[in-house]
Image: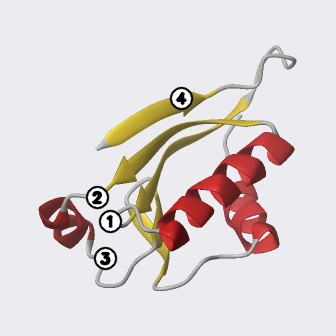
């Protein structure tokens, strides 16, 4: 599992989203989903712990049957397709704190 933290430097108190997981084996669709997640977080100015999950046992624990998938704070928001940027931003806004 790969993990990185996304921070917005130009805001004193960035809003926080928690843990965002992009789930999948690392295929081009998963990479595109990861890119869109980073873009949505940056556009909203949200801080998050972004993780790539490629382990099949971990995918099963999360309840993901189809990839790519987006999981926020252990809630599966999307699986089996690449979500749109507007959709991601809406989900992230609804779950952001701070």
**Of tags 4 and 2, which is closer to the observer?**
2
Residue 5 disc label: 4
Q: Position of residue 64 (x, y in %)?
A: 31, 76
Residue 54 disc label: 2
Q: Quadrant of residue 3?
A: top left
Q: How far, Cα to Cα, is label 4 from label 2?
A: 18 Å
* CB within 8 Å, label 4 to label 2: no
- The residue pinned by badge 1 equals 25
Quadrant where the image shows the N terminus = top left
**Crowd class of label 1 (few under 14; some 14 to 19; many from 20; radius 10 Å):** some
Q: Quadrant of residue 11?
A: top right
Q: How far, Cα to Cα, is label 1 from label 2?
A: 5 Å
Q: How far, Cα to Cα, is label 1 from label 4?
A: 20 Å
**Is residue 95 left or right of 30 when viewed as pictured?**
right
Q: How far, Cα to Cα, is label 3 from label 1?
A: 12 Å
Q: Position of residue 27 (x, y in %)?
A: 43, 68
Quadrant where the image shows the C terminus = top right
The secondary structure type at the circle numbered 4 is strand
């Amino acid at each position: 599992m790969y993990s990185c933290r996304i921070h917005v430097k130009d805001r004193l108190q960035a809003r926080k989203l928690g843990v965002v997981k992009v789930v999948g084996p690392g295929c081009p669709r998963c990479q595109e989903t990861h890119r869109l997640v980073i873009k949505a977080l940056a556009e909203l100015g949200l801080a998050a712990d972004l993780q790539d999950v490629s382990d099949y046992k971990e995918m099963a624990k999360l309840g993901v049957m189809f990839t790519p998938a987006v999981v926020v704070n252990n809630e599966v928001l999307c699986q089996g397709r690449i979500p749109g940027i507007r959709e991601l931003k809406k989900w992230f806004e609804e779950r952001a704190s701070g």
